Amino acid sequence: ALVAAWGVLDRRLSGRTRVLLVAAPLLWAVSYGAMTLYGHWSAQAYGAAARLASGEATGGESPNSRLRIWANALQLIAQQPWLGVGWGEFNVAWSLTAFPGRPTAFFDHTHNLPLHLLAELGVPLATAVMALLGLALWQGWRRARATGGERGTTAMTAWMMVVLVGVHSMVEYPLWYAYFLLPAACAWGYALGSNDAADDASIAGAAPDPDRDRGRAPWLTPLLGVAVTLGGGLAMLDYQRVVVIYAPGEGAGSLESRIADGQRSVLYAHHADYAAATHDQPLPGTALAFRRAPHYLLDTRLMMAWARTLAQGGELDAARTVAQRLREFRNPDADEFFAACEADGPPPFQCLPPAVAWPWRAFLRAELAGPNVR
């Protein structure tokens, strides 16, 4: 609809372009219908249709609908309105907070950009950030609109790309992926950089100001390009330190040594932390793993391993709190973990409620790897 509205309202576009933009919703509907029919005839699942049927994206009966995670996010905001849960801490805060009837999937994002900022940054700071984003969006539109010619059309196209990513961010989190974030940032910068002095001169047919670029180092752009290229190569090499944990080649060494090396990764150590935390036996890096891994994504395996380690370390209330939160997810992968509750004899720790339930922040303040783990 946004693309069609652009085609209707922007008279600077060529007639052919405007027709294509206005026809975009119809083209989408035809493509959707064709893919649905093809999936029916070939007995193959069509992802978009399956998601709509499940109700996840529309607020239907699915336990993982957007409305459910948004309701949980609003409760977290109400509990911590001023400072939020902290940047990057939504998953651990949400996973370790009691939410009866919670979604069964492990969410690390609210799937709504304003809600996510409010939950993690708190109302005051998130409001300021969103106001600045809104101002930058308005400035991008104003400058793109004021730029004439082909450059103006390109700038408006860039601005529309940002708007579409913003709309997508109301139900997903594309900006948490580099292949959405970086193009959106480049497009936004392009729109904001339009209608400057050089553009005005070009539009008017005059020569650009020769003093405009004076003082700019001509070597800066190539240097930045080289730095980005080298940084990408170093990041790839760093990633290989954790790849070998899960896909070892010949002569890769023992699993324990690969995990230890992966935990020294600059960018990807959390993958090695997960492997260390969920390993069958305590490793030298297990304590470090439990201090860092829960900040990335708590899932069934990690919560079971964490609860067991806490219980072994004597932190029974903490262990039972983690087990209690895990039970709320109703995940089949945890059935074996809780099967002991149906057996005869004294119930293990995961079958009993904590004498005092731990709030989620208490897990971050304490040394929770357990004294028996080294």
Image: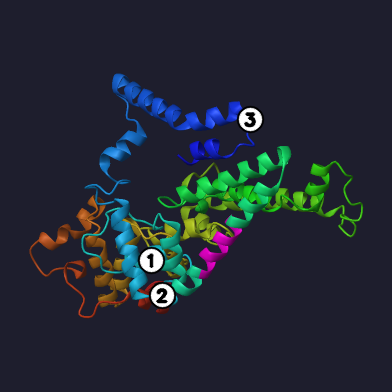
Tag 1 residue = 92
Residue 364 numbered mark, or none:
2
CB of mark 2 within 8 Å of CB of mark 1? yes
Give the residue at the far top of this rendering: 41
The residue located at (88%, 44%) in the rendering is: 206
Q: Label 1: few (<14), some or many (≥20) within 10 Å?
A: many
Residues 270 and 262: in front is 270
Residues 16 and 89: in front is 16
Residues 26 and 338: in front is 26
The secondary element bearing badge 2 is classed as helix
Task: State the separation of the CA atoms marked 2 and 3.
Answer: 57 Å
Q: Label 3: few (<14), some or many (≥20) within 10 Å?
A: few
The image quadrant of residue 361 is bottom left
Residue type beneath disc 2: Leu
The secondary element bearing badge 1 is classed as helix
Residue type beneath disc 3: Ser
Task: State the separation of the CA atoms marked 3 and 1.
Answer: 51 Å
Q: Which residues are magenta?
A: 128-137
Quadrant showing the C terminus:
bottom left
Is residue 244 visible from the viewing direction of this image? no
Tag 3 residue = 14
The residue located at (57%, 52%) in the rendering is: 241
| Of callouts 3 and 1, the N-terminal one | 3
